[in-house]
Image: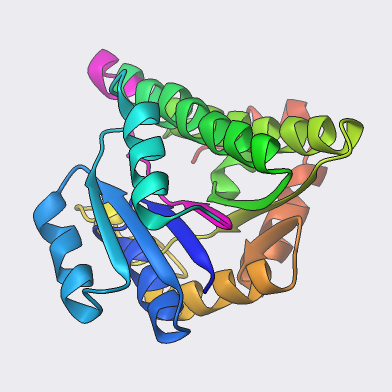
């Protein structure tokens, strides 16, 4: 029976992906700060779900991940769906620093530990949600777009490292557009909002297909392709 660990499974895309893998008969280890939300998943298949309270910004997060892996009996696929992000037009310090702590330090802590586990095992698959926001620096959300670019480069670096060592570790960098989850709740209305259920199905398909990078959906694939071609001297003048 295949085993997946999902970080950030208490809500949003992490929760939706967890349900899809449960339907497939997988064993799940689910982790997040809100343990009570994780128990809702466990009730769906009590004999196939292990629950772990975990804060990616805490120093003991890697140890808690290893405990969850042990209780699950191992790990074949690691799916990372944890993160924060919001617009910060006034550059409020707490927002910037908390975003860097969670999306930078927390991401590195968890992805790094998953890589070390799979390196010991000799094989595995790491899939993580980054964002189209990592394509360019976005003035309305500086730390968010910067940390998403960091995440994408970190995954790329680990993929190169694994190949250099001859390790059978696969990587899937998932870059959704705006998804209608708690992360984007607020006064601002985002365009081209995606339904989380549909996005979750595309995520699972990308993992099955061993995609290295998957932008969701086709509209955002076109948009980010255009963004990459905008010269820096023009980009900096855009009023977003």
Q: Quick check: 145 above or below 4? A: above
Which colour style is shown? rainbow
Q: Nearer the viewer, residue 87 or 23?
A: 23
Q: Can you give x and y, in whole percent of width and height, for residue 204 in the image?
A: 57, 73
- Name the image quarter holding residue 174: bottom right
Instruction: Answer with left or right where residue 138 lies relative to residue 144.
Output: right
Q: Nearer the viewer, residue 27 or 203?
A: 27
Answer whether residue 83 is magenta in the image.
yes
Magenta span: helix, strand or loop, mainly? loop
Residue 22 in view of the camera = yes
Q: Residue at x 28, y 59 (%)?
A: 50
Q: Position of residue 147 (x, y in %)?
A: 51, 29
Q: Is residue 107 left or right of residue 115?
A: left
Task: Give the answer, above or below, for where 220 lies relative to 228.
Answer: below
The residue positioned 52% from the left and 53% from the top of the image is 75
Residue situated furthest top in the rendering:
93
x, y percent for residue 121: 66, 43
Over which residues does the magenta segment extend? 76-96
Please state which of residues 136 and 18 is positioned toward the viewer in this rendering: 18
User: What residue is at 81 percent from the left and 41 percent from the top?
Assistant: 167
């Amino acid at each position: 029976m295949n085993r997946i660990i999902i970080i950030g499974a208490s809500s949003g895309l992490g929760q939706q992906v967890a349900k899809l893998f449960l339907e497939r008969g997988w064993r799940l280890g689910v982790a997040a700060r809100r343990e009570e939300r994780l128990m809702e998943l466990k009730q769906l298949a009590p004999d196939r779900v292990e629950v772990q309270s975990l804060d990616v910004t805490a120093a003991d997060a890697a140890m808690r991940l290893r405990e969850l892996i042990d209780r699950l009996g191992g790990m074949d696929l690691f799916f990372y769906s944890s993160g924060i992000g919001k617009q910060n037009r006034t550059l409020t310090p707490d927002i910037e620093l908390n975003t860097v702590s969670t999306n930078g330090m927390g991401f590195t802590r968890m992805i790094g530990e998953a890589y070390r586990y799979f390196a010991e095992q000799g094989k595995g698959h790491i899939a993580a949600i980054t964002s189209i926001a990592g394509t360019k620096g976005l003035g309305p959300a500086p730390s968010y777009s910067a940390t998403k670019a960091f995440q994408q480069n970190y995954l790329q670096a680990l993929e190169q490292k694994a190949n250099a060592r001859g390790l059978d570790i696969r990587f899937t960098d998932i870059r959704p557009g705006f998804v209608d989850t708690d992360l984007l709740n607020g006064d601002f209305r985002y365009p081209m909002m995606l339904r989380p259920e549909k996005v979750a199905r595309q995520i699972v398909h990308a993992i099955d297909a061993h995609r290295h990078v998957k932008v969701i959906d086709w509209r955002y694939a076109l948009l980010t392709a255009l963004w990459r071609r905008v010269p820096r001297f023009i980009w900096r003048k855009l009023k977003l």
